[in-house]
Image (cartoon, rainbow, N blue to C red):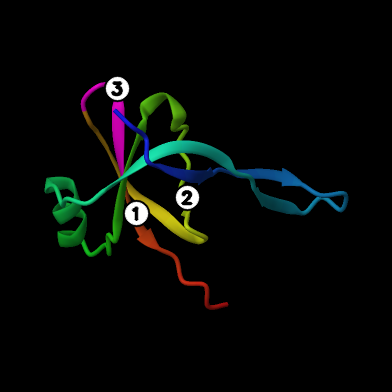
Amino acid sequence: MLWRDVVNLIPISTGQNDMGDITNTPTSKQVFANKLNYRNKAFYQAQANGLKPQITFEIKEIDYEGEQELEFNNKTYKIIDVYPLKNENIGLICEGLSTDG
């Protein structure tokens, strides 16, 4: 299988600054992916549950560590569902995040 796309998985690291305030620091991990152009049962179930799925990616299961966001083509998406695929791959169903403050 050819991996045609690259996505940045964005884990959020929680810590404390010098003043003791809780901080959330986004980091980024680049992984190979395939943008899936078909809609499957999981996609439609997310839609039926009031979510707004827009795009689905296939990645290697070993690359995913519970990240809640990803970036693709300079746009950030929220990962709203994860489902198993064959050959130790998973699908990530994502919805776009608003860039409005």
Whether label 3 touches label 2, CB < 8 Å: no
- Splitting the image into 4 quarters, where does residue 49 fall? bottom left
Dot 2: within a 10 Å radius of its alpha carbon, few (fewer than 14), some, or many (20 or more) residues?
many
For numbered disc 3, what is the local secondary structure? loop
Image x and y of residue 19, in percent: 86, 53
On the image, numbered disc 1 is attached to which residue? Answer: 94
Q: CA distance from mark 1 to mark 2?
A: 8 Å
Who's the residue at 47% across and 58% down the image?
73
On the image, numbered disc 2 is attached to which residue? Answer: 70
Who's the residue at 53% across and 78% down the image?
100
On the image, numbered disc 3 is attached to which residue? Answer: 88
User: Which residue type does callout 2 highlight?
Assistant: Leu
Q: Which residues are magenta?
A: 86-92
Who's the residue at 21% across and 55% down the image?
46
User: Which residue type does callout 3 highlight?
Assistant: Glu
Q: CA distance from mark 3 to mark 2?
A: 20 Å
For numbered disc 2, what is the local secondary structure? strand
> Split into 4 quadrants, where in the image is the N terminus?
top left
65 falls in the magenta region: no
Image x and y of residue 75, in percent: 48, 62
User: Which residue type does callout 1 highlight?
Assistant: Cys
Picture layout, residue 99 above or below residue 72: below
Who's the residue at 60% across and 44% down the image?
28
Q: Residue furthest left?
A: 41
Horizontal placement of 94 versus 12: left or right?
Answer: left
Which numbered tag is attached to residue 30? Answer: none
> Split into 4 quadrants, where in the image is the C terminus?
bottom right
Whether label 1 touches label 2, CB < 8 Å: yes
Image x and y of residue 82, in percent: 30, 40
Whether label 1 touches label 3, CB < 8 Å: no
N-terminal-most mark, 1 or 3: 3
